[in-house]
Image: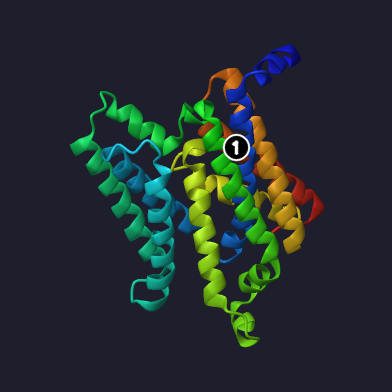
Amino acid sequence: MIDKLTLYFQYPFVRYALIVGVLIALCSSLLGVTLVLKRFSFIGDGLSHVAFGAMAIAAVLQFTNRMIIMLPVTVIAAILLLRTGQNTKIKGDAMVAMISVGSMAFGYLLMNIFSTSSNLTGDVCSTLFGSTSILTLTLREVRVCAVLSVVVVAIFVLFYNRIFAVTFDENFARAVGTKTDRYNLLIAVVIAVIIVLAMNLVGSLLISALVIFPALSAMRLFNNFKSVTVCSAVLSVICAFLGIMISILAGTPVGSTIVAIDVLAFTCCCAAGRLKGVGV
């Protein structure tokens, strides 16, 4: 087994996949804790479906770099979701459901009408559940992912105290002068960037699992925000690494394998939390 792993690590595509997978897992876990605590878990799911629609548009327009379309569209959707969800009669889960279902239906419709692919079903399945494209990344794509990941981590570290305040008591944070709307918007934009980065790794239907499971697992072991965040990041990185390696060795789908490892980790953390007497 060790010899086989050593052999695989000699191939650049394996190293690229692991680097990107670990970076995406790290970014997802950092904001995942905030989303769970703020009851925004389904925003990730809604934005992932928006990214699916944007990817369909990019495919129809035959863009070689689909992120050019996906990133701005998903960021705009995040902003609209936050603004309209707060200021209109359509709030919360209803707004997320509208955006989610509408974007996915629109994207699938475009792919059916304009697609030139001979394997439309396969293309849609790969987009929804992740594809082997994570194993065909170019050095340029790895660099783009690395830069965006560094930006996400830097934002989280620089604004950690503000994010903490907005997460736990938004009303108090607003009362002491914190621009809560600005930081909620920042969180939404960062989540949109993470969603776009994770599309190739786990697909649009499984992105929420990558964001939520590490946070929920960490909450079964710790009650402190900082401890939960650190534990979530460590668990997410380990699960992504193991999932990618198992996928390469066993030939299983990358996204589904990573999520399966996350579910297993959650189960183990639940058992450990019961023994320890910690959890929410």
Q: Quadrant of residue 167?
A: bottom right
| Residue 71 screen position, x and y as percent | 43, 51
Write down the residue under mark 1: 21
Q: Is residue 58 left or right of residue 240?
A: left
Q: Is residue 81 above or below residue 21?
A: below
Q: Which residue occupies the extreme left position in the image?
A: 113
For the point 34% across and 27% down, which residue is it? 122
Q: Nearer the viewer, residue 122 or 266?
A: 122
Q: Which residue occupies the extreme right position in the image?
A: 276
| Residue 84 screen position, x and y as percent | 37, 72
Q: Which residue occupies the extreme front position in the image?
A: 140
For the point 61% across and 64% down, which residue is it? 37
The answer to whether residue 199 is seen in the rendering is yes
The answer to whether residue 264 is seen in the rendering is no
Q: Is residue 171 left or right of residue 3?
A: left
Q: Is residue 7 above or below residue 269?
A: above
Image label count? 1
| Residue 43 screen position, x and y as percent | 46, 58
> Is disc 1 surrounded by few (<14), some (14 to 19) or many (20+) residues within 10 Å?
many
Q: Is residue 94 above or below residue 138?
A: below
Q: Quadrant of residue 46?
A: bottom left
Instruction: Pick the quarter of the image with the N terminus.
Output: top right
For the point 50% across and 62% down, which residue is it? 188
Q: Is residue 199 above or below residue 37?
A: above
Q: Look at label 1 and name its amino acid.
A: Gly
Element assignment for label 1: helix
| Residue 187 screen position, x and y as percent | 55, 63
Instruction: Pick the quarter of the image with the C terminus.
Output: bottom right
Q: Is residue 113 left or right of residue 231?
A: left
Q: Quadrant of residue 34?
A: bottom right
Rendering colour mode: rainbow
